[in-house]
């Protein structure tokens, strides 16, 4: 069900005059803080002592306080630090300072759904999760639009949690394009599945395997990069604008025919079975446990090893060289910036 596809659906009165503490000033944090401030709310940013982000937030005219003090000053506390750090920061700094009747908010359901954070009964708990990277949440807002949000209420202590979540979504620009109501369980499981099986994991693995297949068959790595990596964005942009139909209208008949006969052979039953297994391990908590244990017990040992191995892959070396020759990538196309 789509709600709030127009700002008029939102009861702004429930949030007007409230103070919002944005905990963390990274990808999502900077976008929420600046968008809410420009929507007329009092925003305070919560960071730890010595945080690199402090000067960045202050340079934008934002007030920065230690997490505990920001929490104590706030009617809404939005937690936007990395998921694996949220439970400790919540326990040590947020919980002791959270006002009765305040709202605790998230942009991803992970810590509530997997019970890493168990809020007291006297606060609202909601989620507003933009379905896009933080820098686009900011850039789109500045341009007058908004990245769509999903929102959910886990706990409604005040009787206004639902309205408050929608008003928050309006404040960051989400209702300019549409908000879909979900649950913490649905958002957490589908978000993890999407990023693992399709968006990040699936796409990178598809590209890498295509590249390696061509290089192993003796083709030039630079050519393999163009065919299996560079053109991905051009194809995805067309699908994003007008569905697979628009993309298929734009490609040659040869490409479209090959799409139908070969695509389903490459990503086929074994991949589907693997997707089902990935989903099962998300649902039963196996993935969450592995992720948190690698962090807590192993100090990210596996994570950092995987990061290094992937960064050293030939496709990154070749890509970096080729992208250096594409002058337009240097100016204006940096998606990690607003
Ligand atoms: P992030 O960019 O990795 O957050 C980093 C920020 O948190 C930095 O400002 C960092 O400060 C600060 N920080 C780290 N430890 C802290 C602590 N102990 N106390 C206070 N501040 C601390 O996080 P993110 O990727 O935006 O993710 C935030 C949440 O949004 C997560 O729940 C994530 O799942 C969700 N989400 C993210 C995206 C996305 O686009 N990334 C999209 C949808 C949902 P320093 O840099 O100074 O250390
Ligand atoms: Mg996501
Ligand atoms: Mg995610």
Image: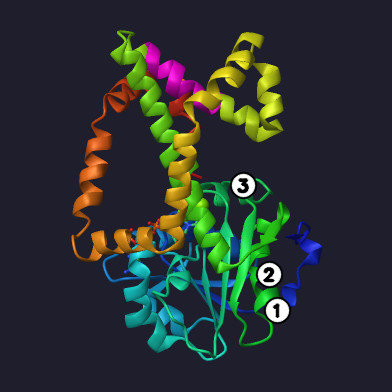
* Residue 308 % position (x, y): 22, 40
Residue placed furthest toward the right: 8
Question: Mark 1 and mark 3 in contact (Cβ < 8 Å)?
Answer: no
Residue in the foreground of this view, choosing between 287 and 141: 287
Mark 3: give few (<14), some (14-19) or many (20+) Cα within 10 Å: some
Question: Is residue 231 highlighted in magenta?
Answer: yes
Q: Determine which of the numbered discs, if any, sits on residue 140 in the image.
A: 3
Q: Secondary structure at mark 1?
A: helix
Q: CA distance from mark 3 to mark 1?
A: 25 Å
Residue at 49 percent of width and 35 percent of height: 269
Q: Which residues are magenta?
A: 223-234
Q: CA distance from mark 2 to mark 3?
A: 18 Å
Residue at 68 percent of width and 82 percent of height: 160
Against 220, is 131 above or below? Answer: below
Residue in the foreground of this view, choosing between 319 and 204: 204
Q: Looking at the image, can residue 209 be seen?
A: yes
Mark 2: give few (<14), some (14-19) or many (20+) Cα within 10 Å: many
Q: Is residue 179 left or right of residue 111?
A: right
Residue beneath label 1, please? 14
* Residue 41 % position (x, y): 61, 71
The answer to which quarter of the image holds residue 12 is: bottom right
* Residue 150 % position (x, y): 62, 60
Q: Determine which of the numbered discs, if any, sits on residue 167 in the image.
A: 2
Q: CA distance from mark 1 to mark 2?
A: 7 Å
Residue at 25 percent of width and 50 percent of height: 303
Q: Secondary structure at mark 2?
A: helix
Q: Earlier in the sequence, mark 2 or mark 3?
A: 3
Q: Earlier in the sequence, mark 1 or mark 2?
A: 1
* Residue 251 % position (x, y): 64, 15
Question: Mark 2 and mark 1 in contact (Cβ < 8 Å)?
Answer: yes
Q: Earlier in the sequence, mark 3 or mark 1?
A: 1
């Amino acid at each position: 069900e789509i709600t709030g596809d127009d700002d008029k659906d939102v009861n702004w009165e429930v949030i007007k005059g409230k103070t919002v503490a944005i905990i963390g000033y990274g990808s999502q944090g900077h976008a929420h803080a600046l968008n809410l401030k420009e929507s007329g709310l009092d925003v305070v940013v919560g960071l730890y002592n010595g945080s690199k982000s402090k000067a960045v937030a202050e340079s934008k005219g934002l007030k920065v306080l230690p997490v505990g003090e920001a929490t104590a000053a706030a009617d809404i506390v939005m937690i936007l630090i990395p998921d694996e750090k949220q439970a400790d920061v919540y326990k040590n700094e947020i919980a002791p300072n959270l006002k009765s009747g305040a709202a605790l908010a998230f942009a991803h359901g992970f810590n509530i759904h997997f019970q890493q954070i168990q809020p007291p009964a006297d606060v609202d708990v909601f989620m507003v999760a933009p379905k896009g990277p933080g820098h686009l949440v900011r850039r789109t807002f500045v341009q007058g639009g908004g990245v769509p949000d999903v929102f959910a209420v886990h706990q409604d202590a005040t009787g206004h949690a639902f309205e408050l979540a929608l008003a928050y979504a309006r404040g960051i620009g989400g209702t300019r394009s549409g908000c879909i109501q979900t649950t913490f369980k649905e958002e957490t499981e589908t978000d993890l599945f999407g990023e693992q099986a399709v968006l990040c994991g699936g796409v990178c693995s598809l590209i890498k395997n295509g590249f390696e297949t061509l290089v192993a068959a003796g083709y030039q790595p630079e050519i393999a990069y163009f065919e299996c990596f560079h053109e991905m964005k051009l194809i995805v942009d067309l699908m994003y604008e007008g569905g697979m139909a628009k993309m298929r209208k734009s490609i040659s008949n040869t490409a479209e025919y090959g799409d139908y006969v070969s695509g389903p052979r490459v990503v086929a039953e074994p991949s589907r079975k693997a997707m089902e297994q990935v989903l099962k391990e998300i649902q039963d908590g196996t993935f969450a446990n592995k992720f948190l244990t690698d962090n807590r017990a192993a100090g990210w040992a596996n994570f950092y090893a995987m990061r290094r191995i992937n960064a050293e892959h030939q496709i990154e070396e070749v890509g970096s060289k080729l992208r250096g020759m594409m002058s337009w990538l240097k100016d204006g196309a940096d998606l990690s910036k607003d």
